[in-house]
Amino acid sequence: MADPMKIRAKLSGDVADVRVLMAHEMETGQRKDSAGNVIPAWYISKVTAELNGKPVMKANWGPAIAKNPYMQFQVPGAKAGDKIAVTWVDNKGDTRTDEAVIN
Amino acid sequence: MNQTRRTALQVAGGVSAYAALVSIGLLRPGQANAEEIAAAFKTQGIAETLKALGAEGAVESADVLINAPDIAENGAVVPVGVGSKLPNTEMLALLVEKNPNALDGTYEVAGIAPQVNMRIKMGQSSDVVAVVKADGKYYMARKEIKVTLGGCGG
């Protein structure tokens, strides 16, 4: 199981500033190991965010997102105490969901 | 760890990668163009990728914003922001012209402000292109980022 994400969601006015840091190798499939074998691609291919269970953002990623991906976006119409949940799925089918309370 | 097992797992992972991408895309409800998006991640160069995204003929617009440094010291971690000032923005995408596959990511922004910041990899100095879909039309902007140390070669 993958390591947990770090999610910070801070409210200013009625806009929540959400910052997400995921722990993932994001291997491109372009690199070779010391023996010259290609290291297979291993990357997060889908990311979704939900505000109180309602989808607000869906992303499709390729392997060119940097290792341990960081993402920042703003959710309008949020209130203190609302829950923001972020889910990722990688190309091996592994998945992880984490949640944070907006404050 | 058992070396044979590790090798076997790596091979299996590589083979199933494309299948997994497609099946996840197909299973996802409410996205008619999932197959197109999976194909768009395989293309090279800006023109072909735009075509795969269905964004051919995207118009250059000053309302498409790219927030990125002029010079990136480390190509493995380049902070880039993509935004749009156009009304009814539905989708943002980021392309890097000279990466092995140009498309970096797409974001459907139904419920968030049309501005996403992320960190990407760049193999070498290149133009980055932001594509925005607003009101069913495509717009784009372009910016050059110089990379002093590449991030895709390892």
Image (tube, rainbow, N blue to C red):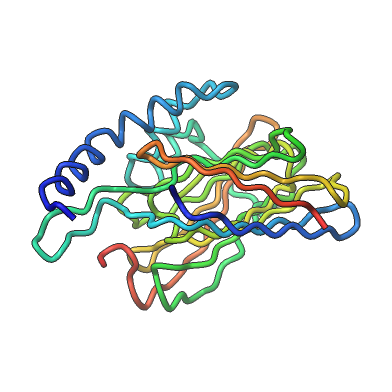
Residue A56 falls in image quadrant: top right
Count all numbered tags in the image, as a single digit. Answer: 0
Q: Residue at x 64, y 53 (%)?
A: B116
Percent x, y of residue A15: 83, 53
Percent x, y of residue B151: 34, 67
Comparing B139 with A26, the one in front is A26
Residue lying furthest front in this view? B1
Comparing B106 with A49, the one in front is A49
Comparing B40 with A10, the one in front is A10
- Whether residue A4 sits left or right of residue B48 in the image: it is right
Q: Quadrant of the C terminus of chain A?
A: bottom right
Tell me: residue A75, above or below residue A68: above
Tell me: residue A85, above or below residue B98: above
- Whether residue A31 sits left or right of residue B71 in the image: it is left
Residue A8 makes an appearance in the image = yes
Comparing A76 with B128, the one in front is A76
Q: Residue at x 69, y 34 (%)?
A: A55
Q: Residue at x 85, y 49 (%)?
A: A81
Percent x, y of residue B119: 51, 62
Percent x, y of residue B139: 60, 43
Residue B59 makes an appearance in the image = no
Tell me: residue B9, above or below residue B99: above
- Whether residue A86 sits left or right of residue B111 in the image: it is left
Q: Residue at x 89, y 52 (%)?
A: A14
